[in-house]
Image (cartoon, rainbow, N blue to C red):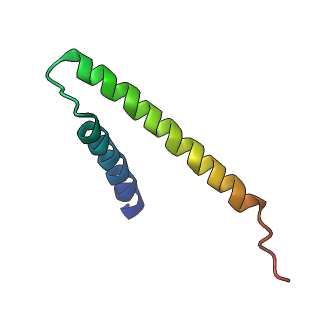
């Protein structure tokens, strides 16, 4: 349960940073569309980085010497 809460907080914090750094206004339809594009792009980068990191960890020799 704690892990799920941490992941949810990570995604919410990321969304807040995107809104704050891009000075988005949700009062107009343009802001919502721009936020969607930026958030999906951010999620794609997070996925790519996690995938790359996982590949590096799997590729390491973790056996004893």
> Looking at the image, which residue sits at the far left?
27
Is 25 located above or below residue 43 in the figure? Answer: above
Q: Quadrant of the N terminus?
A: bottom left
Give x and y (percent) for residue 38. 38, 31
Residue at x 73% of width, y 59% of height: 58
Residue at x 32% of width, y 23% of height: 34
Residue at x 18% of width, y 26% of height: 26
Give x and y (percent) for residue 46. 50, 45
Is 9 located above or below residue 17 in the figure? Answer: below
Give x and y (percent) for residue 21. 28, 40
> Looking at the image, which residue sits at the far right?
65
- Number of numbered callouts drawn: 0
Where is residue 42, by image quadrant?
A: top left
> Looking at the image, which residue sits at the far top?
29
Give x and y (percent) for residue 19. 26, 37
Tell me: 34 left or right of 61: left
Tell me: 33 left or right of 51: left
Q: Quadrant of the C terminus?
A: bottom right
Residue at x 82% of width, y 81% of height: 64
């Amino acid at each position: 349960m704690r892990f799920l809460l941490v992941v949810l907080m990570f995604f919410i914090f990321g969304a807040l940073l995107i809104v704050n750094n891009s000075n988005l206004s949700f009062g107009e339809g343009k802001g919502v569309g721009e936020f969607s594009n930026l958030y999906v792009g951010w999620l794609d980068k997070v996925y790519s980085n996690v995938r790359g990191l996982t590949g590096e960890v799997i590729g390491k020799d973790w056996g004893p010497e």
